[in-house]
Image: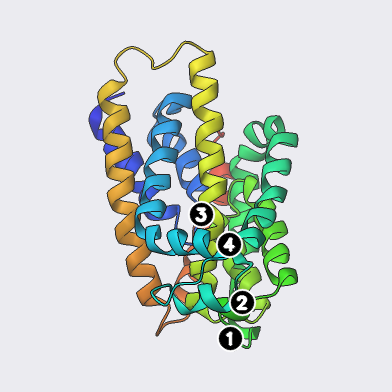
Amino acid sequence: MPLYQAVLLALIQGFTEFLPISSSAHLALCPWLLGWQDQGLTFDIALHLGTLVAVLVYFARDWFYLFLRGFGVRSVAAPAYVNENPHLLWHLALATLPVGIVGLLLKDVVETALRSPYSIGFMLIVVGLLIGYADRRGKRDKQLGSMRFVDTMTIGFAQALAVVPGTSRSGITIATALLRNLDRESAARFSFLLSTPAIGGAALKAVYDMVKEGGLEAGMAMPFAVGILVSCVTGVLVIAFFLRYLRRNTLRFFVLYRVIFGIIILLLAYFRPPAI
């Protein structure tokens, strides 16, 4: 893989993993639109690892105190929502189960039929409209500290839909959190916390598959390292930007982006035979 492809794909992953616009859609469509070969399992691992490190780095303090509080240790230095919601660690753990189960059961379908441009374009539009509806309808009067078990599990079940390319893990979980009346920043923060074990599980599964197939492919050492570094740095910057953005702005821009992008993909798929 040429380094410029590795850099571009890692930038796409870092930008789109944490914005509600679907990283899987962009990564699946990029080779098709640019005439490249599919990036393959090895590079997918690098991208998963990069974004996993990004979310761990950015939320390291949150996870540290979530673990302490989950095991009964209260600290005045912890974020307020951690002390207000002592069971949140275990709620996050249980809410991760649906996406893991669905991912294992539907792995073959997701990697074949659901990666078509028609499916991706459709999901971009539908989930985009759902995000817009949730952004308008949600009362935004709830924060992480006041979340209940039913809130976390509802968002967890919604995250299971993210295995379908074009859905967006952050998009579907933020939309569901807004419908559960979280404010925009809290919805995004919970979405990122919930994504951590899911991204970690996907990365571990991918590493296992790579080792089972013989390890790192010849000539992939440099692209692999570049993929991790670029997607990690980009991911950290995007998380910081997005959380600040949501303090004062709506999700309208991302809704419009998804709908327009989805329409373009459907038109391209109709006039150009898909190769993904």
Mark 4, other Cα within 10 Å: few <14 / some 14–19 / many ≥20: some
Residue kind at label 3, given as amino acid type: Ile
N-term mark: 2 or 3 = 2
Q: CA distance from mark 4 to mark 1?
A: 26 Å
Mark 2, other Cα within 10 Å: few <14 / some 14–19 / many ≥20: many
Residue kind at label 4, given as amino acid type: Gly
Q: CA distance from mark 2 to mark 1?
A: 7 Å
Q: CA distance from mark 2 to mark 4?
A: 25 Å
Q: Which mark is residue 140?
A: 1
- Residue tagged by mark 2? 178
Q: Nearer the viewer, residue 156 or 251?
A: 156
Q: Which mark is residue 70?
A: 4
With respect to residue 140, does 254 lie above or below?
above
Q: CA distance from mark 1 to mark 3?
A: 32 Å
Residue kind at label 1, given as amino acid type: Arg
- Residue 42: image x %, image y %? 43, 25
Mark 1, other Cα within 10 Å: few <14 / some 14–19 / many ≥20: some
N-term mark: 2 or 4 = 4
Pointers 2 and 1 in contact (C-beta within 8 Å): yes
Which of pointers 4 and 1 indicates the residue nearer the eye?
4
Q: Is residue 11 left or right of residue 163?
A: left
Disc 3 secondary structure class:
helix
N-term mark: 4 or 1 = 4
| Quarter residue 178 falls in | bottom right
N-term mark: 3 or 4 = 4
With respect to residue 53, does 261 lie above or below?
below
The number of discs equals 4
Disc 4 secondary structure class:
helix
Q: Nearer the viewer, residue 159 or 274?
A: 159
Disc 1 secondary structure class:
loop
Disc 2 secondary structure class:
helix
- Residue tagged by mark 3? 264
